[in-house]
Amino acid sequence: DVKVTQSSRYLVKRTGEKVFLECVQDMDHENMFWYRQDPGLGLRLIYFSYDVKMKEKGDIPEGYSVSREKKERFSLILESASTNQTSMYLCASSLRTGGLYEQYFGPGTRLTVT
Amino acid sequence: GEDVEQSLFLSVREGDSSVINCTYTDSSSTYLYWYKQEPGAGLQLLTYIFSNMDMKQDQRLTVLLNKKDKHLSLRIADTQTGDSAIYFCAETFKAAGNKLTFGGGTRVLVKP
């Protein structure tokens, strides 16, 4: 059974804190993605990675960074958390194939910044 | 740039058919997808359609694609309470590589 896990389901942090969100997949997928989900806005891509130590900016990278030191693990970092980063964060992974890109999602981390 | 739009909310009675609509702007889409998100869970791929197809049927699900109008729909026959969820349409297109562009999601509420 395919699995994408995220380190926390709920997280509460203070403004200015450095926040780490971890994602691990056990499917040997090359591609990994971080999204944030806000009501009415759908999923917006923050960063993605096609390979170890490789990263690409998505549509809303400002205020975030990522790290991929191992194939199975993709970390999202909020360098200095702000209240407008309160959101649901979803991690996903997929194979590097041509054509159909099925992404497998983790359960999400609901982050609240106070 | 690409844009995918959906209505926010749909209410339907158990046993009726549901139709969720989506419009997109990029005519070079290769695949279009429907994902389902149940409460407290991540997204799960429900079905997809290749851009050279008009229709795809999979048990209770029917996907219709109108390329001329850039309109995608998902019909769920005999809607059940377990179908209550948020449904996202998404597209990939050649220039985007492995990336998906998602709509805002339609929350479907099935009433008994």
Image (cartoon, rainbow, N blue to C red):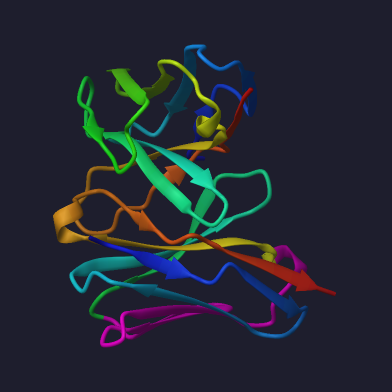
- Number of numbered callouts drawn: 0
**From what the image shows, is residue B13 above or below residue A88?**
below
Q: Position of residue A73 (x, y in %)?
A: 38, 22
- On the question of residue A32 being in view, the answer is no
Between A64 and B99, the one lying in front of the other is A64
Could you say which quadrant of the image residue B84 lies in? Answer: bottom right
Q: Position of residue A30 (x, y in %)?
A: 26, 34
Position of residue A50 in the picture relative to residue B44 (left or right): left
Between A71 and B73, the one lying in front of the other is B73
Q: Position of residue A102 (x, y in %)?
A: 36, 52
Could you say which quadrant of the image residue A46 lies in? Answer: top left
Position of residue B62 in the picture relative to residue B23 (left or right): right
Residue sitting at x 27%, y 83%? B67
Residue A20 is covered by the magenta coloring: no
Highlighted magenta segment, given as a residue range: B53-82
Residue B79 is covered by the magenta coloring: yes
**From what the image shows, is residue A54 above or below residue B51?**
above
Name of the residue lying farthest toward the left:
B95
Q: Position of residue B71 (x, y in %)?
A: 37, 81
Could you say which quadrant of the image residue A51 lies in? Answer: top left
- On the question of residue A16 being in view, the answer is yes
Residue sitting at x 85%, y 75%? B112
Residue sitting at x 47%, y 21%? A22
Name of the residue lying farthest toward the right:
B112
Position of residue A91 in the picture relative to residue B32 (left or right): right
Between A60 and B65, the one lying in front of the other is A60
Residue sitting at x 57%, y 52%? A39
Between A14 and A10, the one lying in front of the other is A14
The C terminus of chain A sits in image quarter: top right
Name of the residue lying farthest toward the top:
A17
